[in-house]
């Protein structure tokens, strides 16, 4: 074998090695992007589910008992069972005091997430009016810790807690 053919063989081998390494890097980078996309979708789905649940929780009306159903629709497990058990009492109290609570989520963030469980902190602003406020709207701001679990393709609330001081 001549020196030229050894160099040519070495060059071909080197090019093949570089092609394999380059292909592996491209494949890995593609996998990293797919993982990042999956993670971002999970965060988005978790935030959307928590936002729906908290929004339902702060929008209750004495003259609209179905407003209580929106919370139950996004709940699961013991939280759902406790909520359903307490809903008739809550409806009576809302009606007795002619209570209307409205609000919206102004900020939320994921504090923990895994493929099947997540925790979100959400802040709301809104108003409440009832017989104790003379029917006048009073501002109310709340912070919640929402624990969600994935059931099939849906993220459902397994627990919802007030965080910090409440009026």
Image (cartoon, rainbow, N blue to C red):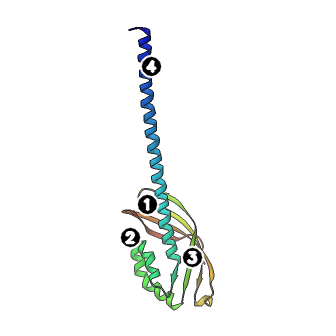
CA–CA distance between discs 1 and 4? 52 Å
Whether residue 20 is situated above or below residue 43 in the rendered picture? above
Quarter the C terminus occupies:
bottom right
Kindly state the secondary structure of the residue where label 1 is placed.
strand
CA–CA distance between discs 1 and 2? 13 Å
| Res 117 label | 1
| Res 157 label | none
For the residues carrying marks 3 and 2, which lies nearer the camera in this image? 3
Kindly state the secondary structure of the residue where label 4 is placed.
helix
**Given the current orientation, which residue lies at the most extreme top position?**
2
For the residues carrying marks 4 and 3, which lies nearer the camera in this image? 4
Q: Quadrant of residue 150?
A: bottom left
Question: Which sits in the foreground, 52 or 112?
Answer: 52
Residue 27 rendering spot, x and y as whole percentages: 43, 39
Whether residue 51 is situated above or below residue 62 in the rendered picture? above
Q: Which residue is mark 3?
A: 103
Q: Quadrant of residue 97?
A: bottom right
Residue 79 rendering spot, x and y as whole percentages: 42, 72
| Res 77 label | 2
CA–CA distance between discs 2 and 4? 64 Å
Q: Which residue is mark 4?
A: 11
């Amino acid at each position: 074998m001549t020196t030229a053919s050894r160099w040519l063989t070495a060059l071909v081998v080197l090019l093949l090695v570089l092609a394999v390494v380059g292909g592996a890097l491209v494949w890995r980078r593609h996998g990293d992007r797919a993982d990042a996309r999956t993670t971002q979708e999970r965060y988005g789905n978790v935030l959307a589910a928590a936002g729906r649940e908290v929004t339902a929780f702060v929008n209750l009306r004495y003259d609209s008992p179905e407003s209580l159903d929106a919370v139950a629709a996004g709940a699961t497990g013991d939280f759902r069972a406790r909520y359903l058990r307490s809903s008739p009492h809550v409806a009576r109290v809302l009606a007795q005091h002619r209570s209307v609570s409205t609000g919206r989520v102004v900020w939320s963030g994921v504090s923990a997430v895994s493929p099947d469980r997540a925790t979100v902190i959400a802040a709301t602003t809104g108003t409440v009016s009832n017989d104790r406020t003379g029917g006048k709207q009073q501002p109310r701001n709340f912070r919640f810790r929402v624990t969600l679990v994935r059931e099939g393709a849906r993220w459902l609330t397994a627990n919802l807690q007030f965080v910090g001081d409440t009026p």
